[in-house]
Image (cartoon, rainbow, N blue to C red):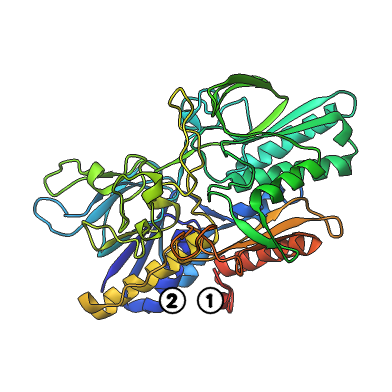
Amino acid sequence: MARLVVMGGGVAGHTTATFAKKWLGNDHEVVVVTPNSNWNWIPSNIWVGVGEMKKEEVVFPLAPVYAKAGIDYRQAKAVSIHPEGKEGSDKPFITIEYTGQGKEGQTEEIEYDYLVNATGPKLNFDATPGLGDGNGQIGPNTVSVCTADHAVHAYSELMNIFEKAKTEKQKILIGTGHGMCTCQGAAFEYIFNIEHEAKKAGVRDNLEIKWISNESFLGDFGMGGLHMKVGGYVVSSKLFAESLYAERGIEWLIGAHVNKIEEGKLEYELLDGTIGEEEFDFAMLIPPFSGVGLKAYDKTGEDITDKIFAANGFMKVDADYTPKPYEEWKADDWPRKYQNPDYSNIFAAGIAFAPPHLISKPAKSPNGTPINPTPPRTGMPSGIIGKAVAHSICNLIKDGENAHIHEASMAEMGAACVASAGKGVFSGQAAAMTVYPVVPDFDKYPGTGRDTDYTFGEIGLAGHWIKHILHFLFIYKAKLKPGWTLIPE
C-alpha cells in the first residue's frame, strides 16, 4: 500500500487529493495536511467584503468531506520535509504541527511514498511596514479580502465608511500593497463591487475611489497584459481596463510600490523614482505572496532548504531557473510535470511551485526597487495542475517507473476568468475573459504571444450570472457531491 501525502487543502491540494483518492480507491492511502478546518471558495470573498454574501456561503468544514471520501485528514501545518528519511530509516517523512482536532501544538512525523506541496502562499503582510502587524498578520491600518474572516471585517469597516459618506466626503484606496504583489484580480473585483454598492446605497457622490497598483499599465494582471477579441474587434487589455475605470469614475495610480503605511495614509514610490503620498479613510491592499516557510533536511539532519526551495520559499520543479534577460525568456522555461528535480516522488501544485521568472516585463525604479506583478497561479490553473499531478502520482503508484507523467504547462494552458464588477439580479456585471495560453509564447504567436481566436472578453449581466453560477458549481464540486468529477477545473 502506497501513501500519498498532500500538504495543503486549497484549490490545488483539494483537487489533487480528491481525484487521487477516487482513482486509487482503498488500495492506497491519501493524507491531507492543512491548518484550516474549512475550505474557502476564495473568488467569492469579494462578495463577503461588500455584504452580498455571508461567510457561511463561501466556506464549509473539511472533516466530513474527507471522512466520506476515505481521506486521512490532519488539521495541522507542515513544518519540514525529510526526503531522505533519517538515520536508521530510509523512509521519507514530513513533520507537522497540529492546529486543531484537539491536538493543538502537538507535532508528528508522517511518512510518505509520494508528496505534493500544495501549501499555497504565505500572505506576507509584513513585507510592507504598516501593512502587517509585525507578527505576520494584517495590521490595523488596512483591510483584506484574502480570507473569509478578513472579508467579514472588511465589510464591517466599509459600512462605517458608507455611513460617514452620508454627510461627508470619504476616500477609498484599493489595490496592491507592495511592488512585487500578484493577484491583482481580487482587488480589481473588489474596487468595482464597492463602487457598485456605493451607488445602491446612495453615497457614491461622496466617495473618492482610487486604484493603486504595481502594474506598469492597467490590465497587466501579472500576465504582461493581453490582446483579446471584444465585440468582434481585437483590443488590448489596457484599453479594456482603462475604459472600465473611466466609465465608473475611478482614478488610478500605477507602477507604484507601497513603501510604508500609517493610519490614514501611505507612502509610495513610482517607476520613475518619484516618492508620493496618498491619504485614505478606507484601504484594501493585497499583500505580496511568499512560500509558507517549509524547511527541508537530508538524512543527516543537514539543512537542504535552499536545494528544494527557491529564495521566495516556493518549491523548485522541472522549470528552467537559469537567470536570463527578458528577451531570452521562453515558453519552454515553464514546468510541465511539476516534479522536483532532485526528488522524483515530490511534486508541487498551484501557487506552491516556483515560477522560472515573471510573465510581465520586469521593471525597477531608478532607486533599484522592483515594481512589477509576479505571476498569477490561482484559480483554474491551480485546479488543472492539481488534477495533472494526481494523474501522474496514480500512474506512478500503479505502473512504477514506466508510468506516464501528465503535463500541464501554463505555456500550453488556457484559462478563463470571470471578474465581478458588481452583484445584482438585474444590475450585476462581470468581465468574462479567456486567455490562451496563460504564459505567452511569442515564437508560436508572434506579436501578441497568444491566440486571439481563444483570447477574448466581454462585460455585462451575463458575465455576472456566470460567476454567480460558478460559485455554486465549484462548492458543489469541492463537497464531492454526485457527479462532481464532471465539473471542469
Work out whether residue 198 or residue 94 is closer to the camera in this orientation and state it: 198
Label 2, secondary structure: give it: helix
Residue positioned 44% across, 46% down in the render: 358
The single residue placed furthest to the front in the displayed view is: 447
Q: Amino acid at mark 2?
A: Lys
Q: Is residue 206 visible?
A: yes
Say which amino acid is labelled 1: Thr
Residue density around tag 1, few if under 14, some if 14–19, many if 20 or more, within 10 Å:
some
**480 left or right, relative to 461:** left
> Are the residues at dot 1 and dot 2 in contact (C-beta closer than 8 Å)?
yes
348 with respect to 170 (left or right): left
Q: Earlier in the sequence, mark 1 or mark 2?
A: 2
Residue found at the far left of this picture:
88
What is the distance, in whole Å, between disc 1 and disc 2 at their CAs? 10 Å
Q: Nearer the viewer, residue 169 or 219?
A: 219
- Residue drawn at point x = 67 percent, y = 49 percent: 55
User: x%, y% of residue 298?
Assistant: 16, 48
Residue 284 in the image, given as x and y percentages of width and height: 65, 35
Q: Which mark is residue 462?
A: none
Compared with 239, 211 (above or below) is above
Name the image quarter holding residue 188.
top right
In the rendered image, is residue 75 in sight? no
Label number found at residue 485: 1
Element at label 1:
helix
Q: Nearer the viewer, mark 1 or mark 2?
A: 1
Q: Which mark is residue 22?
A: 2
